[in-house]
Image: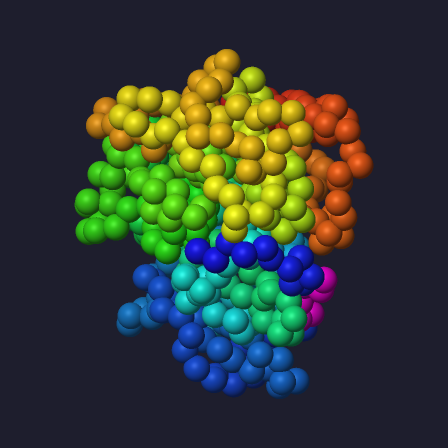
Amino acid sequence: MNLSPTDHTAIPEHVPAAPAIDVDLSTLEEQAQIGIGGTADVTKMRAPDGTVLAVKQPRLQGTLDRELAQRVVSEAETWEQIDGHDGIVGIVDWGSTPVPWIALEYMDGGSLADRTGEIDFGEALWIGAWVANAVRDAHRYGVAHLDLKPENVLFRTTDDRTWDVPKVSDWGLSKLLLHHSQEVNGLSPRYSAPEQFDPETLGPPDDRTDIYQLGTVVYELLTGHPPFTGTAKVVMNHHLTDAPDPPTQVDPDLPAAVDGVLGTALAKKRDERYESMLDFRRDLTALFRAVVLDESVSLLCCSGGTYSTDVGGSTSRHRARSDFAEGSSFAARAEDNSVLDTIRDQSQSTETRTFPWQRRTDAPGIAGEASGTLDRERVGIETDSLRRSEATRSSGETTEAAEIERSLSDVAGSLFRQLRELFGS
């Protein structure tokens, strides 16, 4: 992993939007097949005005299966609710005749799966935070993706001076969080959460399932491979009972703070993961600021009464280590005004927390209720805020603001649970 300081000017200032045109499927010119799914295909097509689109249609085998047709329509309806975010592939139009179809903005930069091993540390964190922000926005509308993987993160190219823009695609497995479905078909085992393999015991997938899945994607971005590999059955058993190798064990050049962030996202029990995708996004952004802006930052995964870890300075010159001995807990203690080079090789804290890197064979317990995220304020990773140093803020002001926002998120989560109980499972 290239840990050289990243030039923050690589952040794109403009996000390409989906074209705003009406689509008549019969007038589209087929260009090439660009995607083959389990039950649907995606084809590159050109509209009469020259606009290039990606059109998704169910794969026909004789007659059109009514259930499959309805799934495509449902996907379009759900996707259309959330595609206003810059980090979600936009729907241009959709229809149901002669077969259900969805016309999407054409993503000309390929997928994240094509770029594994080619992305430096700063860009990897930015991609992770950007995707987290997009999925978090979907959660605000009560929609969980449930199939986050590198193949479903597509890119729109920009000029050579900035990073390409990632957008989340394929909301075919997504579901409304107020509906308690025990079934999730079409899993991608390497990027699936424990509860997706055993929903009867662990409860149905929810918004925190997306947190785990994105954790596997970021893990692969930073280490070069997903947390677990092997056959589908082997990978499933690992997700249910084992912990992956700590990122810093796979790549010793990574800062130890990465272990804390991904350790929280990849917790077996949902109650031990981040409370919301917003919190995961916030920690990824904090790491990004430490690397790109050379700031001293605090991490939610290691604070809130558990740890407070400050990260900053040049990660190419300094790396902190942590103890992952069998049966021990990882803990880091921040010192006032500390930066990355002052995080010690230690396991000290007034209150310790066990991260999943500690290998264990006991089956995970039943996860609690989904927290939900219905907070109404849309918090994005704004380019100007990433470029603007916050060094002039006092640590007290920063902590107070974070506590207020987390309190509001807790209230929203409580409201979400009450709504779900009201409408029933």
Dividing the picture into quarters, in which one does residue 327 lie? top left
Quarter of the image with the C terminus in it: top left
Tell me, yes or no, whether the highlighted magenta stretch contains residue 19: yes
Q: Report the side of 40 relative to 385 (left or right).
A: left
What residue lies at 70% left-to-right and 36% top-to-bottom? Answer: 376
Dividing the picture into quarters, in which one does residue 247 lie? top left
Give coordinates of residue 137: x percent, y percent: 61, 45
Give coordinates of residue 81: x percent, y percent: 61, 51
Tell me, yes or no, whether the highlighted magenta stretch contains residue 97: no
In this rendering, the answer to whether 269 lies above or below 107 is above
Main SS of the magenta segment? loop
Give coordinates of residue 140: x percent, y percent: 61, 39
Which colour assignment does the render follow? Answer: rainbow
The residues colored magenta run 13-20
Q: Please say whether residue 205 is visible from this viewpoint.
A: no
Q: Relative to the observer, which residue lies in front, 258 or 362?
A: 258
Q: Report the side of 346 relative to 140 (left or right).
A: left
What residue lies at 34% left-to-right and 30% top-to-bottom? Answer: 324
Give coordinates of residue 80: x percent, y percent: 59, 55
> In this figure, what is the number of numbered marks?
0
What residue lies at 63% left-to-right and 51% top-to-bottom? Answer: 292
Dividing the picture into quarters, in which one does residue 28 lie? bottom right
Q: Please say whether residue 310 is visible from this viewpoint.
A: yes
In this rendering, the answer to whether 9 lies above or below 198 is below
Outermost residue to the right: 392
Q: Relative to the observer, which residue lies in front, 297 or 12?
A: 297
What residue lies at 38% left-to-right and 48% top-to-bottom? Answer: 251
